[in-house]
Structures are given as C-alpha cells and as structure tokens.
Amino acid sequence: MPRPCYSPRLDNAVAFALDQFRFKVRKGTSIPYVTHLLAVMTLVGEYGGDEDQMMGAVLHDYLEDIYGASSDLLRLRFGDQVARYVVALSDSTTLPKPPWRERKEVYLEHLAGEPPDLKLISCADKLHNCMCIRRDYQTVGDSIWARFSGGKEGTLWYYRAVCMALGQGWQHPILNRLRAEVFQLEQETA
C-alpha cells in the first residue's frame, strides 16, 4: 500500500483557509482570494516544500487579512512550525497597519535573514503575486497601479528588493523564476 503524501493536517489547513477567506477577493478583481492561497501552496509543494511549508503557504495571509486572527489559534490547530511560518510571512499583525513603505522595509530586513524553508514560501507568494500583476496589466494597463499602496514605482521597487532579500544566502530554482518574472514585469510596464 502506498504511503500518503500528506496527512489530514493539510486537509484541515486548506479547509480553514477556505472558510476564513470565503468572502475575500483579490485586489481590484472579483477573483476569490483563496485562489492565491492555493496557488502559493501548490508552488511550495512543486518546488519541494514539505507538509508544514504547504500549510504555512495556504495560511500565509491569515494574520494580515482576517480580522481577529490569532497566531495562538494557528499554533493550537496546526502546530508551532506552521504558526511560526505565518507570523514570519506577515508584514503586519497590528491594526491599523503601519505605513506601507515602513512595513515593507521591515519585512525585507527580516526576510534576508530567514532560513531556506521560510524563503521558499515567501518566494512562492511573491512569484504568484507578480504573475497576477503581469496578467492583469495585460488586461487593464497602467490602471492596475491604483490597486497598490506603493503605486507603480513602489511596487516595482518592492519586487526587486524581495529578490535581493531572498538571495541573501539562498539560491533555488523558484527564486530564479521570480527574478525572471520581475524582469518581465519591468519590461512590459516600462
């Protein structure tokens, strides 16, 4: 009999994400937000992530985007490692959130020193976001930048800076893919 590739813990994390994000959509679209969470989880799994990393991926925006979210609840339901991932992947867990640039600079500073297991999840998240920005740019053009607090210049700066932070002490095929995607975004939106 074959060994399972994952346990019911992953089932529970996916079900939790589906429930928590049921009413959320992607910025400026009618696309269910959970599509992003599932895409990031898939990328993490396809690039070698384990079950805890896949769970962290599907829950990575929980603390940032769900009112009343709790890292203690994540720890209780999914374990210390998954909760650690979600906390580390959040650029803010306070309301109101600090100013955009300040949040991003603090996140980048921490990201540079994070271990490879966490960098994989962050990279998958940023890769999927960048792919979606490129796709939507091809449809709506420059109006896309109104969706983002950093506007065009800030958003492009952030993705370049993410590539640099991730590259501090870490190399991986998914990082090469993110770098190529960021380059394409810059070329197409120049």
Image (cartoon, grey):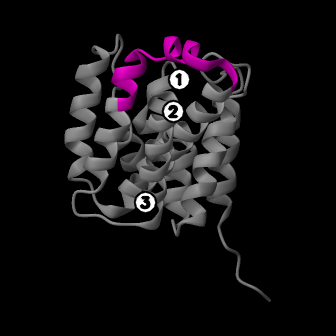
Helix, strand or loop under label 2: helix
| Amino acid at dot 2 | Tyr
**Residue 32 horizontal/vertical position (percent):** 72, 28
Provide the residue designation for mark 1. 66
Give whichever of 161, 23 is nearer the camera. Answer: 161
**Crowding at mark 3 (Cα within 10 Å: few <14, some 14-19, many 20+):** some
Provide the residue designation for mark 3. 176
Provide the residue designation for mark 2. 62
**Crowding at mark 1 (Cα within 10 Å: few <14, some 14-19, many 20+):** few
Query: Is the residue 150 above or below the residue 43 in the image?
Result: above
**Residue 81 horizontal/vertical position (percent):** 40, 56
Mark closest to the chain's N terminus, 3 or 1: 1
| Amino acid at dot 3 | Asn
Looking at the rendered image, the disc whose residue lies closer to the viewer, 3 or 2, is 3
In the rendered image, residue 100 lying in the magenta stretch gets the answer: no
| Amino acid at dot 1 | Ile
Residue lying farthest to the bottom in this orientation: 1
Query: Is the residue 9 above or below the residue 189 in the image?
Result: below
Residue placed at 55% from the left, 16% from the top?
142
Indicate left or right for 144 with 153 as reference: right
Mark closest to the chain's N terminus, 3 or 2: 2
Magenta region = 139-156
Contact between labelled residues 2 and 1, with CB atoms less than 8 Å apart: yes
Residue placed at 69% from the left, 54% from the top?
11
Helix, strand or loop under label 3: helix
Q: Where the N terminus falls, by quadrant?
A: bottom right
**Crowding at mark 2 (Cα within 10 Å: few <14, some 14-19, many 20+):** many
| Label 1 to label 2: alpha-carbon separation | 5 Å
